[in-house]
Image (cartoon, rainbow, N blue to C red):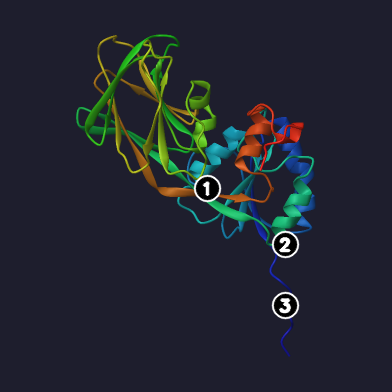
Amino acid sequence: MTEARGPRRTRCFLVGDRTNPRIRRAIEELRPWLEERVTITGTSDLKDGPLRPGRADFVLILGGDGAILQTGVRLAGRAVPCIGIRLGHFGFLAELEPSTCRNDLERIFAGEGTVNERFLLDCEVRRSGKRLARGLALNDAVVLAHTPSQMLALALDVDGEPVTTVRGDGLILATPIGSTAHSLAAGGPVVEPSSRSILVTPLAPHTLSSRPLVLDARRRLTVHVLPRYRRTVKLVLDGQRAVPLKPRDRVEVRRSTKTVRFLSIVDRSFFRTLREKFRWGGSTAEDGESRGS
């Protein structure tokens, strides 16, 4: 006689910075509740290198946007989706709130939710014709002076064609996800996360005519570090990983063939997220003013 088997338990992998007392406490409080409902395949601190979640159905990240960005890069190219609980200062990328996360997780365990793929930037630094460094960015790749407020001269090519020279604090190349990060603070446009585009936003340009660009994500971008000002320059990926640059180095950026899969469960549109987390948009019809038919 064959023993009947019940439904397979959901498998979850946990990620969080245990050196942070708040994150460590949150993991310790949440883990017993999770273990009653799912199988935890493993845990990981925040660190470099690929993430190996085993046969997990999803990765649960406890932290802020930095933790989600770092984990997303480590999951690049893997089929397993991730979702974050906001425990940072801002948490625009975090899907779940601490006060309601258990109810939302129960829905995930029941099979609800959708998976959205987001692309990364493949960034390569070349010096004298040789590859010096390579890395992925989920938010943005920023070329800027090592010392703040020092002027740089950077030349931008798109698909090998010279486009512009930027004189200012630097240049931001951002994904649609990154459009609400450093690029937004520098005056760049807000782009829907599902868009297939790369944003180019000058950082404090010393001109009245410089404007951000929104390019098709199939474009190949090259940033040349011009020797005019002899500054110490760096490439920063997602605000976390830095590569020193020298005059005449070039940074080649393109859409990566790898993607990150994000699990979504909260019934909130992108525009609602902008209104709630950025206080964006001014008044709406909810404020009592009719929009008409």
Q: Secondary structure at mark 1?
A: loop
Q: Could you classify mark 2 by the number of other residues whose Cα lies within 10 Å: few (under 14), some (14-19), or many (20 or more)?
A: few
Give amino acid for label 2. Ala
Disc 1 and disc 3: Cα gap in Å?
31 Å
Say the numbered circle drawn on residue 110: 2
Disc 2 and disc 1: Cα gap in Å?
25 Å
Q: Residue furthest bottom?
A: 1
Q: Which residue is mark 3?
A: 5
Image spot of residue 62 (x, y percent) = 67, 40
Which quarter of the rendered picture does the C terminus lie within? top right
Q: Residue at x 42, y 44 (%)?
A: 196
Q: Could you classify mark 1 by the number of other residues whose Cα lies within 10 Å: few (under 14), some (14-19), or many (20 or more)?
A: some
Give the foreground label among 3 and 2. 2
Which numbered disc flags the more N-terminal residue, 2 or 1? 1
Which numbered disc flags the more N-terminal residue, 3 or 2? 3
Q: Residue at x 52, y 40 (%)?
A: 192
Q: Look at the image and tell me whether residue 164 can be seen.
A: yes
Give the foreground label among 2 and 1. 2
Which quarter of the rendered picture does the N terminus lie within? bottom right
Image spot of residue 88 (x, y percent) = 67, 31
Q: Which residue is mark 1?
A: 51
Image spot of residue 138 (x, y percent) = 48, 38
Image spot of residue 106 (x, y percent) = 76, 55
